[in-house]
Amino acid sequence: MLTAIAFRNLFRNRRRTLITSMVLVFGVVAMLMFGGYKEISFWGIREGAARAQYGHLQIYAPGYSSDDSQRPLARGLRHIEGLRREIERDPRVEMTAEQISLMGLVSNGDKSEAFLATAVEPSRDRKMPAQKIISGAYLSDSARDSIIIGDLLAKSMRARVGDTLTLMATTANGSLNALDVQVAGIFSTGTKEYDERAIKLPLTAAQRLLQTDKVEKLLVILRETSATDAVKNDLASRFARNGPRYEIRTWMDLAGFYRQVVMLYNGIFGFLGAVISVIVILSVANTVMMSAFERTREIGTLMAIGTDRWMIRRIFLLEGFFVGIMGGLAGLALGGGMALLINHVHIELPPPPGYTSGYRLQIMLNSSIVITAFLLATCTATLSSLAPAWKASRLRIVEALGHN
Amino acid sequence: MIRFEQIQKSYALGKTRLTAICDLSLEIGEGEFVALAGPSGSGKTTLLNLGGCIDKPDAGRVWVDGEDVTDVPLSGLARKRRSRIGFVFQNFSLIPVLTALENVEYPLMISGMPKRERRQFAAEWLDRVGLAPHSGRKPDQLSGGQRQRVAIARAMISAPAVVIADEPTANLDSVTTENILDLMEEINRETQTTFLVATHDPLVMGRAARTVHMRDGRIVHVAQGASCAREAMAC
């Protein structure tokens, strides 16, 4: 019956309960929106890093990380077809791809610029869409000496599709080599610093430029990002057992940007959550305090007829709890509706610092965000009732009965 | 049943203290119907509060239902109030969000009685006070007399040893007052429950076996039986 009293008390002053619930609704909606935005951002950066940039895992030759010879591919991988087949037999693995990273100078005869290139297997890299082709076409396995080039680098070089450029780089032996290549396409990733220097070329072209038959690393793309650590551990155990001891890095080891974003967003989210909690606590506490004040005589009566202090506290705590439940549920309904609407109407956000293109605002809600928002609303509303509940239970019966 | 022995009680009023009861001794026997009469500020309500175990004397001792409750903290007396004392207030003091039946049932609920059992008791008491057809109504859907009947049923449902009633007829018309007094008298007679009633109402004094007249925190006169009403009228 104490539960019934608490619940029915909410409807004695409907307007006040509604206003308090609105504060909770605001809090829950804010948490859903920011939590959903955070989630889609993490997901986008995580999947982008793992699927389009680094692969979920990168396998290097033994001793790669401790090599200080300053020569490209001094510690490269060679004859790893057997290793690739074995890795690709794992049902958790989607594919593998060989890559080389290199740097050098690109020249059109009049002008030279430094470049950072990624040498890829075109048919495999096509499945890792890190860039958007804005002119021309992507690399093909048949056109061996073609490249695609970042739009800002192309602009700087005044290069167009079909133009011939010369790539110069230090070979694996330490000498200088050059290779004439044709611009097959111009791309953009949206990241200014990258697009000012980036080139992609077929692996075979890079190996001729560097005069080597090695590759730098083998990327492993998984079907599920969540399997990264498990696959890494399995591979590490296998390498430790049968050798050679290849080095393995995960996308998380390489994606420093992701870790920074996670830390930043978690900090902002935590702060926002704290602010919302304080607003909710003060608002609900104020409501319950006013309600307790108005019902002083009633509390006196309840205590006079034998209701003990704990029961009085329970009534007020339950009132806070019910307000939390109602506000929380209404907040979830409104927040869920807003998330659907936002995802439906395609709101474009301006480019972040360092990027050249904007992105679409999306909200990704999952059970963790929904449960956290709901629990926070319910718990803060209940906790807010602690002080008024305590105060009400400490009233002197005689004074409470005489209260007008 | 209730014994007050050399009671002193005063309240702070700003920087001064107001004496509410001064060196008062009174004994009320089991099953007695006693009225406390006197002008406002004479100490009636203070004496009721002490007898109802919701306040403490500054000096003197109070026995209720055979127990010296003087040194027991008020919080420790909740159980006694729940099971041995019934309260009827001037303004009815029902819980507005509960129905008549739930209001009557409430004291048994906080005593931990199972729902089915306490519902049955409450229904019986509502029937006894003539409100069975209104059991599902909330207090604001009842008249003043009906509310006071619910309050009496609530006070009686725990089969208390004593009922403390503070001006129970003050907000009622004379016909309703007579009805309520009939009910209280009947309960007093049949259950031998002690009634201690503070009142200004001669009708109440007329029903009391004894009327204790108070002034300035002291007993000034005690009238027995039918003389109560006449003396009250004379006052």
Image (spheres, coloured by chain):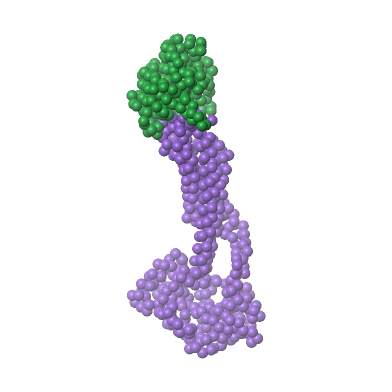
Chain colours: A purple, B green
A387 up-or-down from A204: above or below? above
Q: What residue is at 43 percent from the left and 12 percent from the top?
A: B223
Between B8 and A172, which is closer to the camera in this rendering?
Answer: B8
Q: Where is residue A222 in the image (x, y as percent from the top left)?
A: 45, 69
Q: Quadrant of the N terminus of chain B?
A: top left
Front-most of residues B77 and B38: B38
Q: In this view, does A175 lie above or below B148?
A: below
Q: Which residue is drawn at 57% across and 77% down?
A: A198
Q: In this view, does B159 lie to the left or right of A293?
A: left
Q: In this view, does B52 lie to the left or right of A121?
A: left
Instruction: Report the residue at 36% width, 19% height from top.
Output: B30
From what the image shows, is residue A402 above or below residue A34? above
Q: Which of A105 and B70 is in front in this view?
A: B70
Q: In this view, does A159 lie to the left or right of B87?
A: right
Residue B233, image x and y in percent? 51, 11
Taking the spot 57% from the left edge, 45% from the top edge, the residue there is A22
Where does the image place residue B91, in percent across and percent down from the top left?
Answer: 51, 25
x, y (%) of residue B202? Answer: 49, 14
Residue farthest bottom in this picture: A175
Q: Quadrant of residue B57?
A: top left
* Whether residue A176 is visible: yes
Is residue B44 visible in this depiction of the protein?
no
How many numbered marks, from 0 up? 0
